[in-house]
Image (cartoon, grey):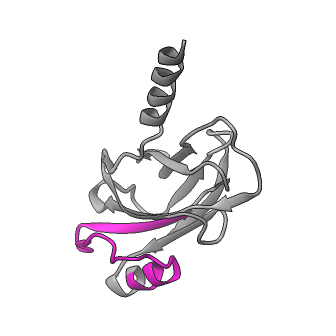
Amino acid sequence: MVVVVGVGIVGAWDASRQLPSGDGWRLIAHQRATGERNQVRLITDQAGLDGAADTMLLRSAPEAVDFERSVVLWLTPVGTISCTTRLDAVLFDRKARIVDVAFSLGLTMGCASPPVGDSFLVAIDRDRLPDRPYRIRVLGPEPRDAAKGALDVSE
């Protein structure tokens, strides 16, 4: 019985791990309990990235970004104090001109209030973005498919 419970806990813990990258994106920094809840900001230069890193109180500089090839999204979905928020996917819909960033809670058992915002800096490949104007939306974490924050990008 103990072995079965142990295997279940290890499996849940492994499934809660944050992926470092995905199709057209990579996570360059993450900080618990910082940022404005449901925030979506577009960062297009090093000065903006440095300012975000300072505001997020990062202990070390975020990964380098080539701003000729990428932009950075500063996203702050609302999670809970006891469960971290996890970035699951960035979905690009060029036809609808939407970029959806999907989040979930890393562990979903015992996630008590109060709500907190977890900040993510995500480098996005410019060639994956739709033509302007387009909309960036934060989905989740609860319920996962509900849009919680958005930014319209026109210029």
Which residue is at 47% across, 17% downward?
3
Q: Is residue 64 above or below residue 139?
A: below
Which residue is at 57% across, 61% downward?
118
Which residue is at 61% across, 66% downward?
33
- The one nearer the camera, 66 or 94, is 66
x, y (%) of residue 117?
Answer: 63, 62
Which residue is at 29% across, 66% downward?
70
Residue 129 shows in this picture: yes
Residue stretch in magenta: 50-75
Q: Residue furthest front?
A: 2
Q: Is residue 27 left or right of residue 83?
A: left
Residue 95 falls inside the magenta stretch: no
Residue 101 shows in this picture: no
Q: Is residue 90 left or right of residue 55?
A: left
x, y (%) of residue 99?
Answer: 47, 52
Q: Is residue 45 above or below residue 12?
A: below
- The one nearer the camera, 4 or 68, is 4
Q: Is residue 87 above or below residue 42?
A: above
Residue 70 falls inside the magenta stretch: yes
- The one nearer the camera, 37 or 146, is 37
Q: Residue furthest right?
A: 113
